[in-house]
Image (cartoon, helix red, strand yellow):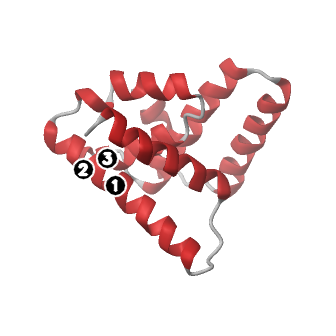
Amino acid sequence: EQLESTLQAMAARGELDAPFIDHLKWEMNEQVARGNSKLLHILQLVVQRACFAAEGTFSESSAAAHHLSAILQIHDRDMRRAYWERVVIRLPDAERAQFASAVCTVYADLGLRVQRGIDVDDALLRQIRLVRDELDEHFL
């Protein structure tokens, strides 16, 4: 809660701008290069929350987007599985359905972009494919 309130205040002051996010991403790349997975996981959370705050999406109505964003940023299969089991599977039915819909919508949208020859981030495409496959495994 303290992280969200701090980031919301920063967003209100206009401090969550592109240079700030770029700096966080740079710091994440540094931690990847150093193999510092503990700090990397913390930074991933901060970047995710900062993006939500900058977009003003901390509302309950964005729960599906929040969970999709979170799971897309988890690259370790075991950690993603834990997120499925700890968070997604325990969501109320309506929220789980919204989450599943969000996964399928993003998956389909990226697939259409690829078919149309529009550049798509390869890492995002790989990750959404994994999440879509895991959706069948954990949800259906």
> Do callouts 1 and 2 mark residues in contact (Cβ within 8 Å)?
yes
What amino acid type is highlighted by mark number 3? Answer: Ala
Against 68, residue 43 (above or below) is above
Dot 2 surroundings within 10 Å: few (below 14), some, or many (20 or more)?
some
- Element type at marker 2? helix
Give the residue drawn at x 36%, y 41%.
135
Amino acid bearing label 2:
Gln
Labels 3 and 2 touching (C-beta < 8 A): yes
104 vs 49, left or right, is left
Q: Nearer the viewer, residue 23 or 45?
A: 45
Residue labelled with disc 3: 64
* Residue 16 showing in the rendered view: no
Query: Pointers 1 and 3 in contact (CB under 8 A)?
Result: yes
Give the residue type that dot 1 points to.
Ala
Q: Which residue is mark 2?
A: 98
Q: Residue 97 in the image: x percent, y percent?
A: 21, 47
Left or right: residue 122 compared with residue 71 = right
Viewer-side residue, 57 vs 74: 74
Dot 3: what SS? helix
Q: Quadrant of residue 36?
A: top right
Q: Which mark is residue 102?
A: 1
Q: Find the distance from the CA under tag 1 to the CA under tag 3.
A: 7 Å
What is the quadrant of the N terminus in the image?
top left
